[in-house]
Structures are given as C-alpha cells and as structure tokens.
Image (cartoon, helix red, strand yellow):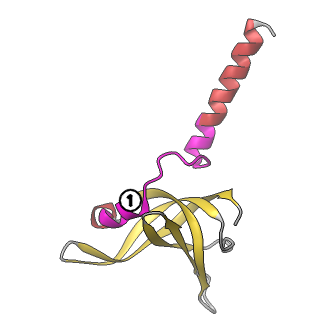
Amino acid sequence: MSGFQNSRTWVAGLASILLFTQCGLLPFDTRPINEIRQSAPSLEGKSVKVKGKVVDTTQLPFMGTRFYKLQDPTGELWVTTQDPLPALGDTLVVAGVLHNAAVLGGSSMGIQVRESHRTQVSRG
C-alpha cells in the first residue's frame, strides 16, 4: 500500500471516530450515575451522558411518555423517552438533558434525564 493510501485510510478512520463521537455513538464522556445524582442541582437543564443497564421500563397508558431505569455500579437513574422502550438488560449510552422535579435544601428530588440520543452497547 502506498503512503498516499495509508494517509487516506488514517484520515478516514480519524474522521469516522470524530463523527461517531460528535453524534454520541461512542461511550466517551459518560459520567457515573452517582456523580450525576450528586451534581443534579447544578446540572439542571444541562446535557449529560451516562452508560448503564436497563433494569426497569414503564409506559403511561394514553400518553406518549415512556420511562426506563438505567443502572451502573454507582446507582440508578430514570430516563424519559418518546422512542420505543429498550429491552430489559440492554446496556446503553444515553445522552439527554437533566431535569429535577424539585430541589430541597440543595438536594435534588425526582431526577430524570430526557433522552435526546441513545446508543445500544450490548444486548441483554
């Protein structure tokens, strides 16, 4: 393979990695759930990215809102979505905006992430 072809392959590979990272398709920049929960008051309305296993799902009848609970070794976090629910046991990388139902005495209550993007890492 010539030097030019090697350069093209290297550039194409780097461009793919950058594109996948920008689209949230790689699990870079994820934060542990416990860290998100502890920082929830200051993260209100901000984008977060988390990786975890789906351990529960819920769909409210007559409403388009669906919820699923992600779990990592540090804790659990509810995610709301307008998309179809993931399967129990799936490991996902989820990007979305953090919302607190209430903040009392500096502690967050009712933390949830409104999903903007989801990538399946492995099947349950």
Asked if 100 appears above or below 3 in the picture, the reply is below
Q: Residue 91 location, x and y as percent? A: 62, 62
Q: Which residue is mark 1?
A: 46
Which residue is nearer to you in this view: 105 or 47?
105
Q: Residue 62 location, x and y as percent? A: 63, 92
Q: Quadrant of residue 74?
A: bottom left
Query: Which residue reaches farthest top?
Result: 2
Q: Secondary structure at mark 1?
A: loop
Which residue is nearer to you in this view: 10 or 70?
70
63 sits left or right of 109 in the view: right
Residue depicted at 47% across the width and 47% down the height: 29
| Magenta part of the chain | 18-39
Q: Is residue 15 visible?
A: yes
107 sits left or right of 97 in the view: left
Q: Please say whether residue 113 is one of the residues in the magenta stretch.
A: no
Residue depicted at 35% across the width and 60% down the height: 35
Residue depicted at 74% across the width and 9% down the height: 4
Q: Please say whether residue 30 is one of the residues in the magenta stretch.
A: yes
Q: Residue 94 location, x and y as percent? A: 55, 60
1 sits left or right of 103 in the view: right
Residue depicted at 62% across the width and 38% down the height: 19
Density class for disc 1 (Cα within 10 Å; few <14, some 14-19, many ≥20) is: few
Q: Quadrant of residue 121?
A: bottom right
Q: Please identify the quadrant where the C terminus is shown.
A: bottom right
